[in-house]
Image (tube, coloured by chain):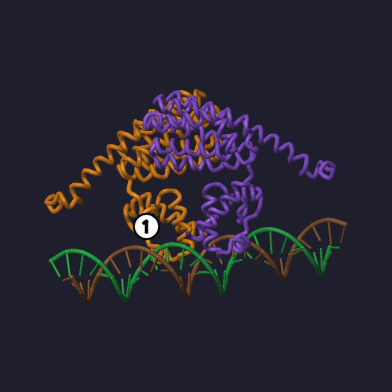
Chain colours: A orange, B purple, C brown, D green
Amino acid sequence: MLASDRAYASLRDDILNWRIAPGTALSETELALRLGISRTPLRSALARLALEGLVDTSRGRTGVVPDVSAESIAQQFEVREALELQSARLAARRRDPAIFHELVESFAHASTTLADGGTDAYYAVVARFDAAMDDAVGNPAMRAALASVRIHLVRARRLGHDNPERLLRAAAEHRLICEAVRDGDAELAASATAVHLRGSLTTITATLRVRAAAGQLTEDPTTPGQEGA
Amino acid sequence: MLASDRAYASLRDDILNWRIAPGTALSETELALRLGISRTPLRSALARLALEGLVDTSRGRTGVVPDVSAESIAQQFEVREALELQSARLAARRRDPAIFHELVESFAHASTTLADGGTDAYYAVVARFDAAMDDAVGNPAMRAALASVRIHLVRARRLGHDNPERLLRAAAEHRLICEAVRDGDAELAASATAVHLRGSLTTITATLRVRAAAGQLTEDPTTPGQEGA
DNA sequence: GACGGCCCTCTTGTATACAGAATGGCCTCC
DNA sequence: GGAGGCCATTCTGTATACAAGAGGGCCGTC
């Protein structure tokens, strides 16, 4: 595999999983040294990440990992809503019913999946769902647009440690979407998707609010006297 | 300005204006020589173009300029429709009425603008419209998503030599959108946008069909005897 | 005459060296 | 004591050199 691809995958993984904190300066020399490659392929990797919005190069020359704010998430969701609703409509018109019938079953067994395999097993089902939708739509441009939006939501998802209660509700919402797509009901699929996205956004926003409050208690220097206790 | 930015802008301009034909192999060495820079910044420019879909690197290692097919345009429009309709709804809720009132006037005078300044003057008004919509929405993610879709349509637009009849109808459609946004009517704005996009797609598709037929007459080696006449 | 293998050339991917610019710290002066 | 300027360090942007791999063409053989 190419060194630049490895660097890209490695940095992407680090950013999505919060191993690199927002605001961290991404020095080319230091990163190249750490990954054991030269600056040339590393620059290529950083450029890709910058174009995807995972690295912010607007302020100053040195790239930094952007923070995840409630505002940025809300903005991403406005784009995501547009794309996913369209995707749901198109998928309902072009789908292979058997594939979505199978997904209905999978989401029906979500509580078992969650109990046996944990959140990772559940997210694997969601990944199959996303892939099935992309395949049904059959539009590379739509797939690419959705991929660029979903990347940012992975970061947000990793934030809140995957509230199981919410995941069960999300599974029920996914099941409704799959049923509508399976039955070829475009408008119902779009509506069910809208319902799901609203639920997701509400959960993420709440998580961010909790995190921001906790951050102020432990980090804000203007509110001292709490962190040492 | 950075050499890589100049190379990017130059190549982007060449591709959008069909100075580089689809299928042309983009040799790094040759391009770097032609632009008077080294391969390093040129590679950076090519990578950006590849991520934007203006250069195809999937087949083989050497990048090529992708063709504009009716299918690819239709796919781009499925994404564009999703984003522009959402954009229209959001703009209607957040706009400054004065700005869109001014745009209504501008599109009302489109025939004069077209007669005096030609298609470039008209497209400048469309650019102001796009910018006003982006500003009204106030969502950087939406702006970026729309920008990546609009790039491809510039190529398609340059294809058909800007049928003036169509441009007048497009101006009327734009005027309706601006009126709806100005009045804060989100659903009407979305509907008017849908009408406009359908008209645009139909025109572009027709242009492509004509071009494909002409191309077969003059280029297809299996149908000889026409080009020398 | 056709097919297969070998060699050559051109391509990309990577590493390294160098130059210009910006930032941070430190010293000096007010 | 504070503020401003200068210097050094470090960063990015660019150029060039090198190596590995793939593709094409040519030659030899069947």
Local SS, label 1: loop
- x 59%, y 49%: residue: B56
Q: Provide residue A161's location: percent of width, then percent of height.
A: 30, 43
- For the residue carrying disc 1, how many other residues have a C-alpha within 10 Å: few (<14), some (14-19), or many (20+)? few
- The image shows residue B204, relative to residue A159, as above or below, that is above
Chain to which the residue tagged by mark 1 belongs: A
Q: Amino acid at mark 1?
A: Gly
- x 52%, y 49%: residue: B51
- x 47%, y 42%: residue: A147
Q: Provide residue A78's location: percent of width, then percent of height.
A: 40, 35
- The image shows residue B187, relative to residue B139, as above or below, that is above
Kindly tell me whether residue A175 is visible in this rendering: no
Circle 1 sits on which residue?
Answer: A60
Q: Provide residue B28's location: percent of width, then percent of height.
A: 60, 60
Name the image quarter holding residue B61. bottom right
In the rendered image, the quadrant that contains the C terminus of chain B is top right
Q: Nearer the viewer, residue B30 or A138?
A: B30
Q: Left of A60 or right of it: where is B45? A: right
Q: Provide residue A47's location: percent of width, then percent of height.
A: 46, 55
Q: Nearer the viewer, residue A97 or A227?
A: A227
Kindly tell me whether residue B63 is visible in this rendering: yes
Q: Nearer the viewer, residue B58 or D12?
A: D12
Name the image quarter holding residue A115. top left
Q: Nearer the viewer, residue A84 or B165?
A: B165
Q: Left of A110 or right of it: where is C12? A: right
- The image shows residue B136, relative to residue A191, as above or below, that is below
